Each structure stands twice: as C-alpha cells, then as structure tokens.
Amino acid sequence: MKKNMTKRLLAALLAAVMALSLAACSGGDNAGSGDQAASAALTEEEYQQAVEDLGAEMTEIQNNASTAMTDPESAKEVLESMKAPLNDFIAITPPEAYAAGHEKMQSGCQSMIDFIDTVVAMTEETDQTKLTELVSQMDEQLRTAVNDMAEGASLLDEASN
C-alpha cells in the first residue's frame, strides 16, 4: 500500500516538475540559477541564463526521478534534491525589468518547495485523516506553484520583448 502511494506521489511530483520546467523554459530569455544567487542584481543576460539553468536542472531531476519510482528512499532523495535549485532561484536578485515576473516565479518556487515537503510527509504518514489533510494541502500547493510560475514566465517573456 505504501509503495503504491509513493508511486502516486512521485507521479504527481513528476507532473509538477514538468510544469515547472515548461514555465522556466517558456520565460523566453529569463533565468534563475544557484551559482548566481547574490544580493546584487544580475544583468539581463545573467538572469536569462539563470532561468534557462533552472529549467535544465528541473528536467535533469525529472529524468532522475523516473528511475527512483520503485525505491521510496531514492524517491525522497530526488524530492529533496529538487529544493536546492528552487531555493537558489528564489535568492536571485533580478534586473529591474524582470522584477514582477521574478516575484511570481519566487512564489511558485516556494509553493513547489512546500509541495515537495508535503509529498515527503505523505510518504511517512499512516493516519488516514492526516493523509487526507496533506492531499488537500498538496493540491493547493501544486496549483499555486503552477499558476504562479506560468504567470511569472509570462511576465518575464513580456519583459524580455
């Protein structure tokens, strides 16, 4: 039973990663990467590269996640590994032209981190009432992550044109 739940949760997570990758890639010339997280604003070119890097990192994690589907411990490691690039992107100071889009992307990244934490909590939970609550939280977190990232990507695309 727990193995089936882990598979379902990972399937939901893979869908979320795909949405994140698409949002990061659809931002046109926008970017976010951990190597560039700093208090000084990035140049437009650096920021564009950072968004592309975030999309690439999420795609790589998605590819790795497919091999972790049968092992709950590996699945947790993949989930935890997803948080680093998201946190790195949150820490970036974008150029002024990308500020509004980046703010939405930050919100989406934080919601995705919250989603990941909820997925991990679900793999360890056995109480059905608590699981029901976590499913509800997970649904809202994923919806917020996808919506905010899509809106942020759209704003970033507008800013780059």
Image (tube, rainbow, N blue to C red):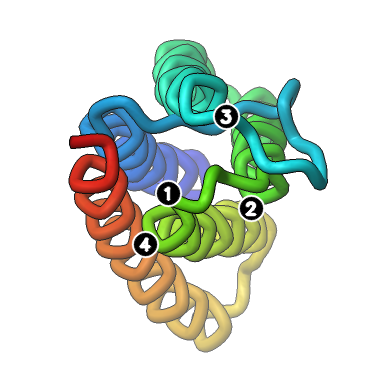
Q: Position of residue 135 (x, y in %)?
A: 41, 72
Q: Which mark is residue 43?
A: 3
Point out residue 97 in the picture as x, y percentages from the top left corner. 41, 49
Q: Which residue is mark 1?
A: 98
Depth check, mark 2 against mark 4: the one in front is 4
Q: Quadrant of residue 25?
A: top left
Mark 4 or mark 1: which comes first in sequence?
1
Circle nearer the N terminus (3, 4): 3
Q: CA distance from mark 3 to mark 1?
A: 10 Å
Q: Choose mark 2 or mark 3, whichever is in front.
A: 3
N-terminal-most mark, 2 or 4: 2
Q: Quadrant of the C terminus?
A: top left
For the point 48% across and 18% down, the residue is: 49
Badge 4 amino acid: Leu
Which residue is found at the position 32% from the left and 55% from the top?
A: 152
Q: Nearer the viewer, residue 121 or 94?
A: 94
Q: Which residue is mark 2?
A: 120
Residue 106 visible from this viewpoint: yes
Q: Which one is earlier in the sequence, the residue at label 2 or at label 3?
A: 3
Query: Considering the numbered disc 2 on the image, is that residue within a helix, a strand or a loop?
Result: helix
Q: Residues within 10 Å of mark 3 (few under 14, many from 20)?
A: few
Question: Helix, strand or loop at disc 1?
Answer: helix
